[in-house]
Structures are given as C-alpha cells and as structure tokens.
Image (cartoon, rainbow, N blue to C red):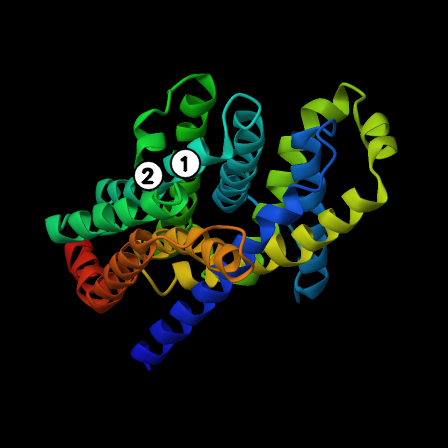
C-alpha cells in the first residue's frame, strides 16, 4: 500500500512538472504594466475560492492552524511576487539557473527541522541533478552561466528560492506535528486564500485595485484563467498531496524537470538546435531522480526513527 502511494505521488509530480513547464509561456502573455502583487493575489484568491466551494466544512480555522495557513500562503505568494520583481532586474536565464538551488535549500531546511536526516550521498545526488539542470537551462552554453552577475535581482530571487523551499518543509512539519490536519484540499484552499489576501492587501489599501482591473485585457484574463485553474489550483493541490507521502527534498527535486520538458518542446519544434550535451545532461538528471526515488523509503523512515 505504501509503495503504491509513493508511485502515485511520483506520477502526480510528473503532472505537476508538465503544468509548471506550461506556465512560462502563459505568464509571458501578461501586460508588463500590471501589478505583480495584485496578479498573484487575484490568482490565489480565485483558486482558493473554487476550492472553498468543494470543502464539506467551510469554517476558517483558529489559533495556531490559522497562523500556519497564513504563513504557508505568504511563502507561496512571496515567491511568485519576488520572481516577477527579480525579472525587472535580471534575465530569465539567470533566475532559472539560480532556481536549481531550491531543492538544495529544501533538503538543508528539512535536515535542520529533523524532517530528513543528513545523508551525504543524497546531497551529492541533488548537486549532480543541479549540474545537469544547469546544462539544460543554459542550452549547453556553460560559459554564459560563469559570466552571470549577482546583483539585486539575483539576491532577492535567492530569498524567494528559500521561501519556496520552506513551503514544502513547513507543510510537512505542521502536518506531522498535528498543527494542521493532513488534509491536502483544506491546506491548499486556506493557504491560497490567506496568501492572496495578504499579498494584495497593501496595494488594495493604497487604492491601486481599480486601476489594475481597468488595465486587465482579454489576453491577460485568458492567461490568468489558465494559471489559476491549472498552474495554481492543480499544482498546489498536488504539492500538498505528495508532501504527505514523500520527503521535501524529493518533492523539490522535481523542480529540475520543467526545464527539461521545455527543452524537449523546443527541440521538437526546431526552436533550439540539438547538442550532444543535452542527451548527457538529460540522462544525468533522470539517473539522479531515479536514485532519489529508490532511496526515498530509507530517508523518510530514518527521519521518523530520528523523531522518536
């Protein structure tokens, strides 16, 4: 039963990777004049409201659980807002290269929180997967990566990566310790609503909402609808389900797959020229993911023994 649950979690994460890969061309359709915080806010609130209609009990939790949901929502919303802000100071290639640090951050946070135990072999495999992902992100031009400049945009995006890594860990820790119920639907709903309200509240109070709504065009609404229904509602629900079944580092490692899927699409449509390094990087990445999945049981079980 446990094996089948983990296999199902890996299949869900493959779906998650495909949806995340599809979000990049959709997000590129937005009018750059739109407020990123209000875009994230509207996206989260609409997705959260849809989930709220599906809940059997719709009462907002109180006490520590409410604080956890609010913090989870802020971690999610903060990451997306920081990403949009960082793109004003940096390039997509630079941010994509920096995002490979996210699974490493997730693992180190999990070790510090005693969700996982420190395994040097696991840390080494995550680093190998990050190296393979860098080859894919740079389209084989490693020289471009070494020439990257770390400035304001890059620094704030690293903070965003830590926030993204912290989301999976906090969700797992809060569920394991009973601070929130192990209910993926409820956690996704409440965290989306809380994050959407909190990230959009400052600009709403400053009176920016009417102008934002007037600026929204038809293409913006179509892109927002797709991102809300699929790359927000579905992907965050998937993250909640798999976080209860897999370790945070394993979940975060699937973040290496969207760049590979985007590369496959570009190669299929002739948008990128084939290089032999792509095959080596893809094989390295797949081998690293297979190793992590194969050793997942010992990592999680070891953590549970450690907690006892």
Q: CA distance from mark 1 to mark 2?
A: 7 Å
* Horizontal arrangement in the rendering, residue 189 relative to residue 212 (left or right): left
Q: Is residue 155 above or below residue 5?
A: above
Instruction: Farthest residue to the bottom: give it.
Output: 1
Q: Is residue 40 above or below residue 177?
A: above
Q: Is the C-beta separation of discs 1 and 2 under 8 Å?
A: yes
Which residue is under mark 2?
A: 101
* Residue at x 71% of width, y 58% of height: 50
Which residue is under mark 1?
A: 161
* Residue at x 60% of width, y 54% of height: 231
Q: How many marks?
A: 2
Residue 264 position in % (x across, y down): 46, 59
Question: Any mark on residue 298, and which?
Answer: none
* Residue at x 18% of width, y 47% of height: 123
Residue 273 position in % (x across, y down): 45, 51
Residue 256 position in % (x across, y down): 38, 51
Image quarter of the C terminus: bottom left
Q: Nearer the viewer, residue 269 or 68?
A: 269
Secondary element under disc 2, as helix, strand or loop, is helix
* Horizontal arrangement in the rendering, residue 83 relative to residue 1 (left or right): right
* Horizontal arrangement in the rendering, residue 40 relative to residue 64 (left or right): right
Which label sits in the foreground, 1 or 2? 2
Q: Quadrant of residue 220?
A: top right
* Horizontal arrangement in the rendering, residue 126 relative to residue 269 (left or right): left
Circle 2 residues within 10 Å: few <14, some 14–19, many ≥20: some
Instruction: Farthest residue to the left: give it.
Output: 120
Secondary element under disc 1, as helix, strand or loop, is helix
């Amino acid at each position: 039963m446990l094996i089948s649950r983990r296999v199902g979690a890996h299949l869900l994460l493959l779906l998650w990777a495909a949806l995340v890969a599809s979000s990049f061309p959709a997000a590129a359709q937005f009018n750059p004049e739109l407020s990123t915080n209000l875009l994230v806010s509207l996206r989260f609130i609409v997705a959260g409201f849809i989930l709220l209609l599906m809940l059997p009990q719709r009462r907002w939790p109180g006490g520590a659980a409410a604080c956890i949901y609010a913090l989870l929502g802020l971690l999610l919303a903060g990451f997306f807002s920081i990403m949009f802000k960082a793109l004003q100071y940096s390039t997509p290639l630079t941010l994509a290269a920096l995002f490979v640090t996210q699974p490493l951050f997730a693992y180190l946070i999990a070790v510090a929180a005693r969700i996982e135990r420190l395994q040097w072999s696991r840390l080494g495999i995550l680093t190998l997967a990050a190296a393979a992902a860098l080859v894919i992100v740079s389209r084989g031009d490693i020289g471009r990566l070494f020439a990257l400049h770390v400035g304001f945009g890059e620094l704030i995006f690293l903070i965003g990566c830590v926030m993204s890594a912290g989301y999976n860990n906090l969700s797992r820790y809060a569920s394991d310790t009973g601070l929130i119920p192990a209910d993926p639907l409820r956690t996704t709903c409440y965290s989306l609503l809380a994050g959407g309200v909190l990230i959009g509240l400052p600009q709403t109070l400053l009176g920016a909402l009417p102008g934002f709504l007037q600026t929204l065009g038809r293409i913006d609404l179509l892109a927002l609808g797709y991102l809300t229904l699929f790359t927000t509602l579905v992907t965050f629900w998937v993250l909640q389900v798999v976080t209860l079944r897999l370790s945070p580092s394993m979940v975060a490692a699937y973040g290496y797959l969207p760049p590979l899927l985007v590369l496959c699409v570009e190669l299929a449509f002739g948008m990128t020229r084939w290089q032999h390094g792509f095959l080596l990087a893809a094989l390295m990445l797949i081998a690293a993911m297979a190793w992590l999945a194969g050793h997942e049981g010992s990592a999680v079980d070891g953590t549970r023994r450690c907690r006892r």
